Image (cartoon, rainbow, N blue to C red):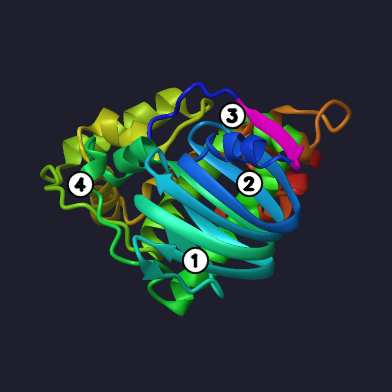
Amino acid sequence: MAAESSILIDASSATTDVSEAEQTLSDLWDHPVLSVSGDTFSLRRRTHGDHRLQLTALELSGETHLAIEVNRFVGVAELVDGSLRATSNDEILDVGAPFLLRPGVAEAWASNLHAELLTFDLDALSRFAGTDAAASLRFDHRGAVSPALQRSWELTVAHVSGVLRDAELRANDLIRQAAVDAAYAAALAAFAIDVEVADAPVVPRAVGRAQEFIAAHIASPLSIGDIAEASGLSVRGLQSAFQRTLGVTPAGYVRSARLAGARSDLRASSTEHDTVAAIARRWGFAHLPRFAQHYRAEFGEQPSETLRR
């Protein structure tokens, strides 16, 4: 997925007016139609992210019915509280687990709903999957295809949500790009979103081009899509080429390169002027314990030991 210059989103809204609520929902979905039963109604929405990936907390009080057209953004929703019955393209969704809002028409019947959604720009998701044609993506499943992949999705969402909710992490281009890529990869895997694309031949020269590109851009927001484009392969072709040629994923290769960059900075720094946390974030590592774990596995010592020495 190519790194893009993105306008950060940090928006909240609240209303008791149905028309205003429909206008708010139109930021994500086309032609939302909201019906309310009774006198009690309110909508609260809080959104973080950028145009590629948005985390939204949505609360609807009262008894409501919502119909939407899913065109620009697909999303994965999770019920936090309240009661909900929902369909996607007339197929009933299992709302007891994270469920996919696929392209088409979705409806929801809710009572005092509190839900969280992670929404993906459909065009960007298509490019990440290896195609420029969003229509060629296949959404054959409404939920995660296995308990293990559902758990993997939930762990990824917990990490990505932490990044998007934290103003400092959200503003760090390296960390935000890594979170966007992680969410896209997890969604494609967990919900088996697929496209039939013929991969380019896997050749060492393509891997070499990818390595050169990574070295030249290692300090910039760098996505798997960037690397794939530079190598001349699709995302899938790139992943296969790295596994076969180097025995590592592209993401793992980038992480190792950034760990090496962090090590270089740690060795050149003074504890009076720099900290492990500051250097870790400079190289795109948002979670300090995980950074220390990867660092020790790579170099056989803790980053604090390198800094002291």
Which residue extends farthest right?
Answer: 272
As drawn, the label of residue 173 is: 3
Q: Nearer the viewer, mark 2 or mark 3?
A: 2
* Residue 10 belongs to the span the image colors magenta: yes
Q: CA distance from mark 4 to mark 3?
A: 30 Å
Q: Residues within 10 Å of mark 2 (few under 14, many from 20)?
A: many
Amino acid identity at mark 1: Ala
Q: Is residue 257 left or right of residue 36?
A: left
Amino acid identity at mark 2: Thr
Lower sequence index among marks 4 and 3: 4
Lower sequence index among marks 2 and 4: 2
Residue that label 2 marks: 56
Helix, strand or loop status at disc 3: helix
- Residue 83 lies, with reference to residue 49, above or below; the image says below
Residue 16: quadrant of the picture: top right
Region in magenta: 8-16
Q: Residues within 10 Å of mark 4 (few under 14, many from 20)?
A: few
Residue that label 1 marks: 86
Q: CA distance from mark 2 to mark 1?
A: 18 Å
Q: Residue at 53% of width from left, 24% of height from top?
A: 6
- The location of residue 189, given as percent across then percent down, is 38, 61
Q: Residues within 10 Å of mark 1 (few under 14, many from 20)?
A: many
